[in-house]
Image: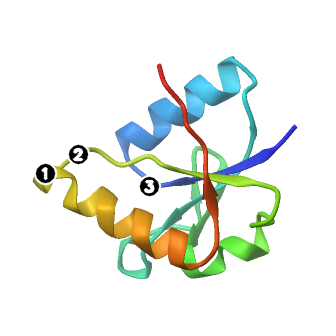
Amino acid sequence: MKKLAIIGASTNARVIYKFVEFYKLFEVMCFAVDKEYQNSDSFCGLPLITIDDLSKFINKDIDLVFIGVQWNRLNSDRKHLYNKVKKLGFKFANIIF
């Protein structure tokens, strides 16, 4: 089973996590946020890391990332996160529910 990192640590990220776990779509390894939003070491019982540390938890050549944040500010937050993670070389999961 492929591993997955979820970007975000809010209600939306929690809903995505429960959906992925319920349907056994991926093995969720961690949640990741920008450094300024890391206010804990864990979220939903999994490590909460900075986006810069993603490669310590998943393999960018095999595993996937999902942007689990809401569409606030006309998706500018999601666009910022997508571009940042893509620049690091990660690929994205497409989860529709």
Q: Position of residue 6 (x, y in %)?
A: 56, 51
Choose the circle earlier in sequence order: 3 or 2: 3
User: Residue 91 lies in what quarter of the image?
Assistant: bottom right
Residue that appears at 52% across and 78% down:
87
Chain-order first, disc 1 or disc 3:
3
Which residue is pictured at 21% across the width and 52% down the height? 75
Amino acid under disc 1: Leu
Closest to the camera, between mark 3 and mark 2, is: 2
Q: What residue would you read off at disc 3? A: 8
68 or 84: which is nearer to us? 84
Amino acid marked by disc 3: Gly
Give the foreground label among 1 and 3.
1
- Above/below status of 55 relative to 45: below
Q: Residue 89 appears at what percent x and percent y? A: 64, 73
Residue identifier under label 1: 74
Q: Which amino acid does label 2 sit on?
A: Trp
Report the residue marked by disc 2. 71
Q: How many residues crowd around disc 1 within 10 Å: few (fewer than 14), some, or many (20 or more)?
A: few
Query: Left of 65 or right of it: where is 1?
Result: right
Q: Which residue lies furthest to the right in this view?
A: 1
User: Local crowd at mark 3 within 10 Å, few (<14), some, or many (≥20)?
Assistant: many
Q: In this view, does 87 lie above or below 12?
A: below
Report crowding for label 2: few under 14, some 14 to 19, many 20 or more residues within 10 A (C-alpha): few
Say if mark 1 contacts mark 3, CB within 8 Å: no
Question: What percent of the width, then of the height, locates residue 8?
Answer: 44, 55
Q: Is residue 47 left or right of residue 33?
A: right
Instruction: Mark 2 and mark 1 in contact? Answer it, CB < 8 Å.
Output: yes
| Secondary structure type for disc 3 | loop
SS under mark 1: helix
